[in-house]
Image: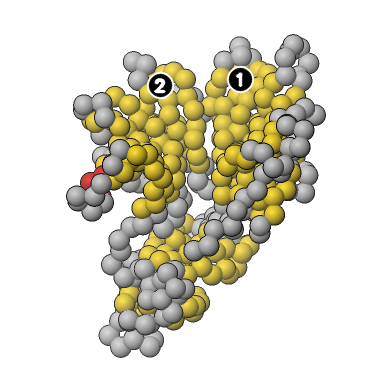
Amino acid sequence: HAQEKIYPIAPALSFGGSVNDAGQCVGYSTTALGDLHAHFWDSGMTQDVHVGPLSFSKATDVNVDGVLCGIYSTFIPGYIVSQFRPYVGDAQGNWLDIGTLGGGGGFAYALNDHMHVVGTAKDASESMRPFLWDPSTGMQDLGSLGGFTTPRDLDNFDRVVGMSANAAGEYRAFLWQAGGMSELPTLGGSAGDAKAINDHGVAVGNSTDGGGVQHATLWPAGAASPVKLQDAIRPGTSWVLTGASGINELGEICGTGKVNGVQRAYRLTPLVSGNRLSGARPGITGRDNTLHGLGFEPGATISVAYGLAPGRTAAPGCTGQFYSIQNAQVLLNTVADADGRIAVTFNLPSSLAGTQILVQALDMGRCIMGEVRSQLLQ
């Protein structure tokens, strides 16, 4: 595919931060005066979205609605030097300092589609602490495994992953949910770091084995043991996967590794029997959502059905095929692109909030039924 370039605000340096499902990107870039300003990129245009009174701001993440989180610099009463502060904002110039845990500064690292933010902020003793910020309830301390803690990512259910030192001083990956933090197991070594989590509760990052070697790692939702991603790819490849930094709702993973000793970025796409759906994104009722899918016959008509319970429903148009859903209702029909993918937008009625739904797709080009995806709507 042709790649669109993301230009800096001025002809100098530009640094990436994150990208959302709409293809909007954020980061920070130099200006004509050499300052560093947050930028927002959309549809081929880069926009300066600087916040604060001083010369530095940085956007670190962007959600599905184009809301940003990031860091800016300002002077705080009682402090001699300027402080970094966490903020949320949008491309229209509206922004909010989300505060700290009682100290002078802090950093925002990621936000979800509810505009909830994770980062680190100083408490009253000027110790840096991990936080989760909610626009309704404010900032809460996430605790730790025993030492310094950095949250990396959160999903739309406020499950947070990151890295925390335990009582022995070893840095381990963690999962925080429903008010408590738990340590995620390693591949047998003493170190781990979870970098991302999707809305199905699957986390990725890196951890070490018994010999102290670091590997890209996946933690399946609810599973007792992590997966070494190197073991999930084709044997005999020249790739050595050392870390994973992102995972989407389809299970596609990006990260870094080495090819013949040279560091490179990678994307892993899961091999599926039939096809796979992402579920509705962001999975919030009363608004538009987008459904993504992969593994279809290019150019084929794709029929997506949904229901509330497992069962068996005959699929129209493909004799002998059945949705694995009781009383399955066709949600939509679309056409797969040249890569065998779909992306369709539709509205989820508010009446479905709190409902667990099942979705499944039929590739009518080959009459192949795909995986069933279960999703709790919010």
Q: What's the residue at 33%, 46% (across, down)?
A: 220
Mark 1 neighbour class, 10 Å CA radius: few under 14, some 14 to 19, many 20 or more: many
| Image position of 339 (left or right of 120) | left
> Percent x, y for residue 74?
75, 24
Is residue 23 at least partly visible in the picture?
yes
Q: What's the residue at 69%, 36% (across, down)?
A: 30
> Percent x, y for residue 116?
60, 41
| Image position of 239 (left or right of 348) | left
> Percent x, y for residue 221?
35, 46
- Helix, strand or loop status at disc 2: strand
Q: Quadrant of residue 144?
A: top left
Is residue 217 at least partly visible in the picture?
no
- In the picture shown, does residue 273 fall above or below 170? below
Q: Pick whichever of labels 1 and 2 is earlier in the sequence.
A: 1
Q: Which residue is mark 1?
A: 122
Q: Quadrant of residue 131?
A: top right
Q: Quadrant of residue 180?
A: top left
Q: What's the residue at 31%, 44% (across, down)?
A: 259
- In the picture shown, does residue 28 fall above or below 122? below
Q: Which residue is mark 2?
A: 165
